[in-house]
Amino acid sequence: MDRRRLFKLAATTALATTLAAGAALAQEAVKIGAVGPKTGGLAGGAAVSFWPNVQLWAHDVNARGGLNIGGEMRPVEIIEYDDQTNPGETIKAVQRLATQDEADFILAPYSTGLNLAAAPIFDRFGYPMVTHTAISDQIVELSQRFPNMYFTLGGATGLAGGVVEVLTKMRDAGQIGNKVAMVNVADAFGIELAEVARPAFAEAGFEIVYDTSYPLGTQDLSPIVKGAAAAEPDAFVAWSYPPDTFGLTEQAMIEGLDVKAFYTAVATSFPAYAGRFGAAANGVLGAGGVAATSASFQEYAARHEQVTGAKPDFWASGMVYSSFQILEQAIEAVGSLDKEAVSAYIAENDFETVMGTISWDENNNNAAYWTVGQWMDGVFNGVASTGREGAIEPVAKTGWE
Amino acid sequence: MKRDAWQDLALGAVLLAVAACLPWFGGSYWLSIGVTIAMYTVLATSWALFSGPTHYISLATTAFFGIGTYTTGLGIDHLPYWVLLPIAGVLGAVLAGLVGLATLRLSGVYFVIFTLGLAELVRQIITWVQNFSGQKGLYVLTDITEADIYWQLLGLAGIVFLGGWAIGRSRLGFALRIIGDDETVARHSGINTARAKVILFMVPGAVAAIAGAILAPRYVYIEPLLAFTPMLSFQVVIMALLGGTGRLWGPLVGVIPFTFLWEAISASFPNQTTLLLGLCFLLIVYLLPKGFVGLIESVRRWAKSREGYA
């Protein structure tokens, strides 16, 4: 067989396969847009918490036969765009999805800044916007302006308040004293958390014996940790970002910063954290958390690993998936692709998700969210929340061995 | 003034008027593309005003743009929006003036390196101030629509073109062309080269800051990572070079095809966007070393020489 005929045969086979697949998916697919960072500053976080869940959700829905829309099973088709961690690109991509691809629904983008950049467009086209990674203390104002925007992950006040609550609990149990060393990354979210925590610690009767900040991207964190150790604190609290969460922990091990409560913020809940520090991570406190022992989360985590080949993190991952579930349940309950009706349904109902029940307050905010979790034997379980079930008691950290 | 000059001005005004009709005909998708084109036209044209004649490559666009964004972000709750735009312009011009005084007496390489670091410097200063004062996240919640932003950018583009046209006909423009050809000759002819360069460098500084201030309401939430994205400086340089800096309209013919190319790549290859853009940069540099302006002019020359034979 010469090369040309071989090619023809291959082409025919490919065509036949495509046609057969097309026949199996006789129903027209529901187009779902997904915009998030694949490159740029937030690509690392999105690769852990966002994109695998897009893949998993599409897989789960299509494995069940698709979305049940008024008795008709229709598969979902995901249209993905990389926003390069640039709000201008997020805006363009959402516009493209809404007008060129005519997406039936669009999943909320990744991170606070990119969600807020996209919010006016979701609002203009009437897409429901169930955010999963937007953390804000301005929810009242935002929900008035963007009535179809929903918040699930909480705000800085709650996250910082959770830490104060946990430390207070540990102090009352006699596990720690009242001296706290606090550091923060000098960037938007780190500054905000430190600003909220300072008066909250004072009010709870803690003494802040060390309080400093470091620029985003600082490589050498040893002066920070040495300074904290010299102040002989009972607890170490770092309002940190992904690179420094790891860096501070490493330095604390090197310096032997032997505190009974050690907290780092963003990315402590990533599976890579336990992967890197192993047993030394035991007892480390961090931002977020899940009810890790709940059947719904365990079943989700197993499926996540099986389908995407990676473990979910113990905070945002579950919420990202839950936000997709909320959209899915609302679409099926309404039984049509009417954006307005789906939005109205989301506003008026509670939802059962892998993170448990999600319900809204008057500001479209999920007021009950996880604030602090703690590593123990490879699992990061929630120890404090603003009203979720499944929290376990925090324990004192016993060294870095 | 010569008749040609008036014709150029009239043509520019007509094109601007046509462009201003986009929000009524284009729909929201084309409007968002329009905003991107208008933004890069403003940035690349003002960039070329300075870098074209002087051959100093400035990578400071992001720094000025970020300052403008933060001016709106910090000021929107306290001052009327319209006051913020000139404030941003003044801040951008002052910063450009300071940077110019510090670096433009040096040779080109030092200038490039300094401007590259400037965005990071400004970003760190702003973060430090925020950290110091306990400033929370900045929200810019206004009723300014995408069409408003588009028209403002078009207006700014009109000002930039008019300014560039005027500078090209002024003593300053003449001085800069001489500096670009040979700085020593310029100095010996009695031109205060440092002053001329500093004054002209303030133009892209002010324009980029105003553009940042105009676009802040579009981003809603202002944070350093988003306001000081280093990519912006490079994109502006690449678009201006693709067009060609020898003519005032040069960057424009770079911005428009590049925006569509960018859009096509983003839409078709979501997983390889950055990779393919990098390849396009390489191709542009190899195939169009003088930009579209060079291409258009060599086609013109070729056509003329053919006429000569006919």
Image: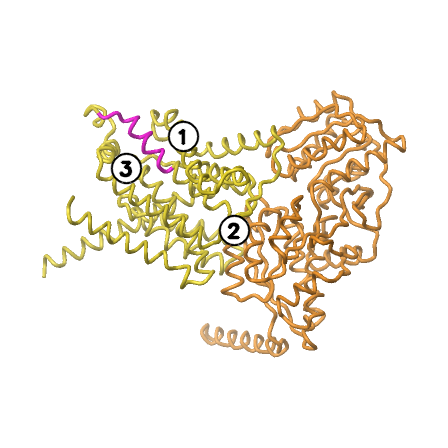
Chain colours: A orange, B yellow
Q: Residues within 10 Å of mark 2 (few under 14, many from 20)?
A: few
- Residue B179's disc is none
Front label number (3 vs 2): 2
Q: Dot 1 falls on which chain?
A: B
Q: Nearer the viewer, residue A344 or A316?
A: A344
Q: Is residue B202 magenta?
A: yes
Cα–Cα gap, marks 1 and 3? 21 Å
Where disc 2 sits, the SS reads loop
| Kind of residue sitting beneath label 1 | Val
Q: Position of residue A357 (x, y in %)?
A: 78, 57
Front label number (1 vs 3): 1
By secondary structure, the bulk of the magenta-drawn segment is best described as helix
Q: Residue furthest top?
A: A230
| Kind of residue sitting beneath label 3 | Pro
Q: Dot 3 falls on which chain?
A: B
Q: Nearer the viewer, residue B252 or B296?
A: B252
Q: Can I make out residue B12 in this image?
A: yes
What is the magenta range?
A: B191-204
Q: Are marks 3 and 2 in contact (CB under 8 Å)?
A: no
Q: Earlier in the sequence, mark 2 or mark 1?
A: 1
From the viewer's perspective, tell me whether residue A342 is left or right of residue A102. Answer: right
Q: Are marks 1 and 3 in contact (CB under 8 Å)?
A: no
| Residue that numbered label 1 is attached to | B94
| Residue that numbered label 3 is attached to | B53
